Image (tube, grey):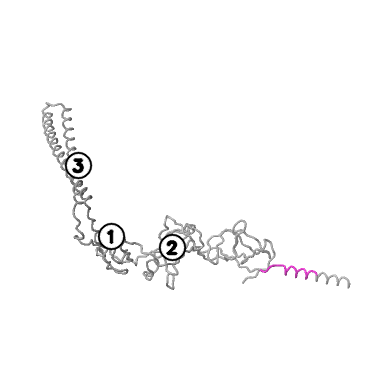
Amino acid sequence: MRRWVVLGAMVALALAGAAAVLGRGAAEVEVRRAARGPIAEWVEGTGKARVRERHAVSAPVTGALERVEVHAGDTVRAGAVVARVLPLTPTPLDPRARSEARARAAAATAAEAQAEAALRRARVVEADAARTLARARALLAAAALAPSDHDVAEAAARAAREEVDAAQATVGRARAERVAAEAVLAAPRGAAGGAVPVASPVAGVVLRVAQESPGPVLAGTPVLELGDPRDLEVALELLTEQASRVRPGAEVELTAWGGDAPLAGRVRRVEPSAFTKVSALGVEEQRVNVLVDPAGAAGAWAPLGDGWRVEGRVEVARRPDALLVPASSVFRGDRGWAVYAVEGGRARLRPVRLGAMAATEVEIAEGLAEGTPVVLRPTGALRDGERVRAREP
């Protein structure tokens, strides 16, 4: 009897020791159960606020720009004179150039006279052809002329009219060449005509003055820019792979613009053409502008200014009832995204398909059931099927 008692005690001790050893070998892991809830996914970028419609006011002629009297922030009305340009004085001709110009003017005058003589001859021929056609019509009506002869007379009259038109065009061209040649000979008159006014094409606010001080300008040189600073848009720069998921009407939050509260906006358009930009790490990236319009309360964008830097995030997905797990529980395995689910005291590798992704949570679209505990922050030492002790925070 005593022998059986001793054997039983030894077996109990062995079982207790084995349980202790097994208990010490199980890794303790922190878990969180997959649960349903709302989630929204955003993509982030930086950009600038800018006036939607800008109007450049340019110098109409080459010359000397007089001092611009308006400044950035001034309001101007349509047609108001914002600057003046004194046209460039022509350079006087030297004796040789003047002799050549006189010769060209004389040749142009002779060509004009020759063209006018040709026009007079063409008009005589036209009048003669018109009289011949009138006689042919009378004879045709009296059945005294063959129809073919009438057609010949009509064709001759038409050709004579076309010759007159061509001669008139030649006279006009010769006259223009003569006027141009004589203009070269005309003595420079300096600024007798006065400065040319530069008028504002629209009503608006001066956004920027390109050249405030007097100085030479070429025709077409921008002098200032006009626009309505209350009519703003934001151009957010996103990576092309992010912008491919953005749709017009998507919600936008603008931050880091200088105020405490974020500004609301809506995507109006994703520009069709991308551009290359070098990141801070020296990597070339393809980016595209996403244009954002104001949303929310009227006047909320009033503190924002043209050219201000902003940061923003654009909503690309929203699920009101999704199966969610912490983002720290998901990792990339050999076959894609995966999690470690705890089942029967062991960690089981479960491939999953992700949906929307937020900063702290991700949507599990496939591969996991609601209520399943998943390991948070799994380490590389954890293996599929390994015994674990789950601990929920």
Instruction: Inspect the image, locate mark 1, and give the three-letter code of the amino acid beneath it.
Output: Ala
Would you place residue 107 above or below residue 135 in this image? below
Return the x and y of residue 19 as percentages of the image width and height: 75, 69
N-terminal label among 1 and 2? 1
Dominant secondary structure (helix, strand or loop) of the stretch shown in magenta:
helix
Which residue is denoted by mark 3 in the rendering? 170
Magenta residue span: 14-28
Instruction: Inspect the image, locate mark 3, and give the three-letter code of the amino acid beneath it.
Output: Thr
Q: Nearer the viewer, mark 3 or mark 2?
A: 3
The circle drawn on residue 236 is 2
N-terminal label among 3 and 2? 3
Circle 1 SS class: loop
Per the model, the C-alpha gap separating discs 1 and 2 is 33 Å
Looking at the image, residue 223 sits to the left or right of residue 8; the answer is left
Instruction: Please check the rendered image and state whether residue 195 is part of the magenta-colored stretch, yes or no.
Output: no
Quarter of the view holding residue 375 = bottom right
Give 182 or 273, whichever is nearer the viewer: 182
The circle drawn on residue 59 is 1
N-terminal label among 1 and 3? 1
* Badge 3 density bin: few <14, some 14–19, many ≥20, Cα 10 Å: some
Screen quadrant of the C terminus: bottom right
Looking at the image, residue 144 sits to the left or right of residue 223; the answer is left
Instruction: Inspect the image, locate mark 2, and give the three-letter code of the amino acid beneath it.
Output: Leu
Instruction: Please check the rendered image and state whether residue 23 is part of the magenta-colored stretch, yes or no.
Output: yes
Would you place residue 351 above or below residue 154 in this image? below
Give 18 or 276, whichever is nearer the viewer: 276
Give 203 or 350, whichever is nearer the viewer: 203
Would you place residue 74 above or below residue 111 in this image? below
The circle drawn on residue 391 is none
Screen quadrant of the N terminus: bottom right
